[in-house]
Image (cartoon, grey):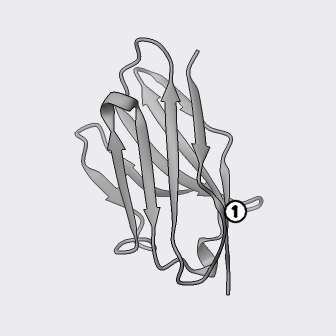
């Protein structure tokens, strides 16, 4: 059983920072891709940042220069450092982990940026 758990969300003022964490647990899994998405009811889910199969980092244009994705492979842990947050970054952020042909999602963590 693979579990994905996000943490680190919260309420912050515009211009502030937050660091999200994602821990993937499960025996004998090899993660090929990991990423952060955000999704609000009534809106399309948006890719925020991810590691592709080659380990390259990709970012949505809206977060380039402000967000940084990183990971610790031995711990199956991924981070999203979010700086200079804007009210439009307010959303529920989800961690996504791909292993083989399977995909696992976390429950999400709320990020709220006040103006």
Q: Return the x and y of residue 54 as percentages of the image width and height.
A: 22, 39
Q: Return the x and y of residue 75 as percentages of the image width and height.
A: 38, 31
Q: How many marks?
A: 1
Question: Which secondary structure, mark 1?
Answer: loop
- Judging depth in this view, the residue of 15 and 52 nearest the camera is 15
Q: Quadrant of the C terminus?
A: bottom right
- Judging depth in this view, the residue of 100 and 107 nearest the camera is 107
Q: Quadrant of the N terminus?
A: top right
- Judging depth in this view, the residue of 3 and 101 nearest the camera is 3
14 over 68 or under it: above or below: below
Q: Residue furthest top?
A: 28
Residue that appears at 36% across and 21% down: 30
94 over 98 or under it: above or below: below
- Determine crowd level at label 1: few under 14, some 14-19, many 20+ residues with C-alpha closer than 10 A: few
Q: Residue furthest bottom?
A: 115
Residue that appears at 65% across and 70% down: 90
Residue identified by numbered label 1: 43
Residue that appears at 60% across and 37% down: 5
Residue that appears at 60% across and 48% down: 7
Q: Return the x and y of residue 93 as percentages of the image width and height.
A: 61, 54
12 lies left or right of 17: right
Q: Return the x and y of residue 21 as percentages of the image width and height.
A: 51, 47
80 over 65 or under it: above or below: above
3 lies left or right of 72: right
Query: Dividing the picture into quarters, in which one does residue 86 lie?
Result: bottom right
Residue 13 in view, yes or no: yes
Residue 44 in view, yes or no: no
- Judging depth in this view, the residue of 106 and 21 nearest the camera is 21
69 over 25 or under it: above or below: below
């Amino acid at each position: 059983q693979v579990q994905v758990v996000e943490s680190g969300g919260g309420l912050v003022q515009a211009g502030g920072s937050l660091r999200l964490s994602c821990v993937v647990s499960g025996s004998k899994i090899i993660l090929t891709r990991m990423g952060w998405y955000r999704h609000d009811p009534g809106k399309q889910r948006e890719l925020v940042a991810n590691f592709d199969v080659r380990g390259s980092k990709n970012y949505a244009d809206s977060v380039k220069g402000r967000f940084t994705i990183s990971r610790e492979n031995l711990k199956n842990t991924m981070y999203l450092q979010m700086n200079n947050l804007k009210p439009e970054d307010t959303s529920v952020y989800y961690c996504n982990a791909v292993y083989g042909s399977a995909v696992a999602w976390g429950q999400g963590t709320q990020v709220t940026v006040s103006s």
